[in-house]
Image (cartoon, helix red, strand yellow):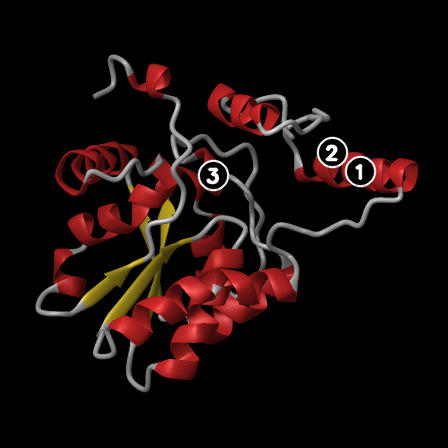
Amino acid sequence: MPETAPEVKKNAVAGYGAEITFCEPTAEARENTARILVEKTGAVMIHPYDNFNVICGQGTAALELMNEISDLDIIVAPVGGGGLMSGTSTAARALGKNIKIAAAEPLNANDAWKSFTTGVLSPSVNPQTVADGLLTSLSELTFSIIRNNVDQILTVSEEAIIECMMLIWERMKIIAEPSAATVLAAVKENPGFFKGKRTGLIISGGNVDFRSFIGKV
C-alpha cells in the first residue's frame, strides 16, 4: 500500500487483520514491492485492474444495473486504472444495442482522457486530486478495452467532485467517496450531454476520511 494512502484506508485494512506492507506512491514501487512479497511468501499476485478476470468481475455492477433497467441511454463509471470502466463498458456493449458509455475522471488526474484523445497511452505524472482512488493510470489492457468500447471521457473539477459527494451523502444517504462522486459530477458539469437521457451511474467506493474534509465542505 502506498505510504500516502488515506488513513481511513490504512485503518480499514488493518482492522480486518491484514499485515500491510508500505511502499513509495509510484506504480513502479507498488509492482516491485508486490513482486518481492510474492517471491518471499509464495503468494499469488492478483492485479487490482490489469487482470481480465478481475475486469469481468467488476463488470457485474453494470450487468446488474442493465438487467434491472433495460432501456438506459447512457451508463457512466469512474476511471482510474480502468478495471471498473473496462468491465462496465464490456458488459454494456454486450447488453445494450445503442447505449452510450462514458467515463468520469478528475481533471487533475486526466491520463485516461489524454490517452483516449491522442490514441497513445499517457500515464499521469504526480497527479493531485481529492479523488485518490483514481490516481492510478491505465494499463495497456484497460486502455485497449476502453479505447474500443467507450464513447466519451468526461473530466470533472475538484469543486464538482466535493459538491456531488455531499449531495449523494445528503440526498441519497449513501457514503460515497470522492472517486465515486465523479460520475454525478460528470452529469452536473455536462448537462447538454445528458439532457433528456436515461442515465445509469456506477457509484463505487465508500472510503472517506471525514476529518480531511473538515473546512472544505
Vertical order, 207 against 147 (above or below) = above
Residue 100 visible, this angle? no
Q: Nearer the viewer, residue 127 or 75?
A: 75
Among numbered discs 3 and 2, the one appearing first in the sequence:
2
On the image, numbered disc 3 is attached to which residue?
Answer: 133
Q: Which amino acid does label 2 sit on?
A: Ala
Residue 144 visible, this angle? yes
How crowded pointer 1 is (Cα within 10 Å; few <14, some 14-19, many 20+) is rated as few
Q: Which of 192 and 216 is in front in this view?
A: 216
Q: Is mark 1 on a helix, strand or loop?
A: helix
Q: Percent position (x, y) of residue 120?
A: 57, 62
* CB-based contact (under 8 Å), mark 2 and mark 1: yes
Residue at horizontal 71 percent and vertical 36 percent from the top: 30
Q: Which amino acid does label 3 sit on?
A: Gly
Q: Percent position (x, y) of residue 39?
A: 91, 41
Residue at horizontal 61 percent and vertical 24 percent from the top: 14
On the image, numbered disc 2 is attached to which residue?
Answer: 29
- For residue 32, the mark is 1
Q: Percent position (x, y) of residue 40?
A: 91, 36
In the rendered image, the quadrant that contains the C terminus is top left
